[in-house]
Amino acid sequence: MTTREFKTHSAEETIALGRSLAPELKGLHLVLLQGDLGTGKTTLVKGIADGLKAAESHNVTSPTYTLIHEYRGAETNVYHIDLYRVEKRRELDTLGVEELLQEENSLLLIEWGEKFAQMVSAADGTIAITRVNDQERKIKFTKK
């Protein structure tokens, strides 16, 4: 298990960090995104999706209401999933996350995945974001 820590001081720096982390996420299938509301999880995903050439950063939006956003890249498909509004295992099962995990060359970035034990056990890594102040974020990437 390896852990790396970073600090960013703006949304632009957080996006840039996501771009630089993207190559390290290739080959992983499930990464949990942890952090309170508004800490910058989607902002980081903008950079990751851009770095993996699955979507340009300005096209990445929060999946809070749609639950899953799919970004198809030439080499990697990125699924940004938000489980904040999902309360029961049955609801999770209807989303088809298990099927997405079986896809070749797919990366699932799941917000609020720690609510479900099966997501935690299946995770290849976690990215935890903590708000230090209005602009500064502490980002901790742990890869199993």
Image: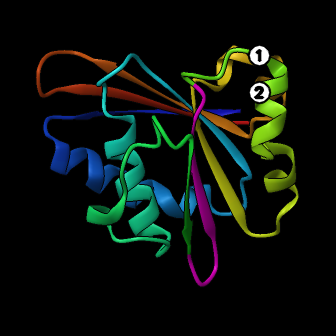
Q: Residue at x 75, y 42 (%)?
A: 95
> What element does badge 2 sit on?
helix
Q: Residues within 10 Å of mark 1 (few under 14, many from 20)?
A: few
- From the top left corner, tell me how far across and down residue 40 is, in percent: 31, 33
Direction from residue 87 to residue 122 in the image, left or right? right
Q: Name the residue under label 2.
A: 91
Direction from residue 121 to residue 40 in the image, left or right? left
Q: Which residue is drawn at 17% across and 51% down?
A: 12
Taking 60 as reference, is 80 above or below it? above
Q: How crowded is mark 2: few (under 14 residues within 10 Å), some or many (20 or more)?
A: few
Q: Mark 1 points at which residue?
A: 88
- From the top left corner, tell me how far across and down residue 14 is, in percent: 27, 44
Image quadrant assignment for residue 124: top right
Q: Residue at x 76, y 19 (%)?
A: 116
Taking 119 as reference, is 75 above or below it? below
Image quadrant assignment for residue 107: bottom right
Residue extending furthest toward the bottom: 74
- From the top left corner, tell me how far across and down residue 19 is, in percent: 38, 60
The amino acid type of the residue labelled 2 equals Glu
Part of the protein shown in magenta: 73-83
Is residue 82 inside the magenta stretch? Answer: yes
Mark 2 → mark 1, Cα distance in angstroms: 5 Å
The amino acid type of the residue labelled 1 equals Lys
Q: Which residue is drawn at 80% across and 46% down?
A: 96
Q: In which quarter of the image is the C terminus?
A: top right
Is residue 105 inside the magenta stretch? Answer: no
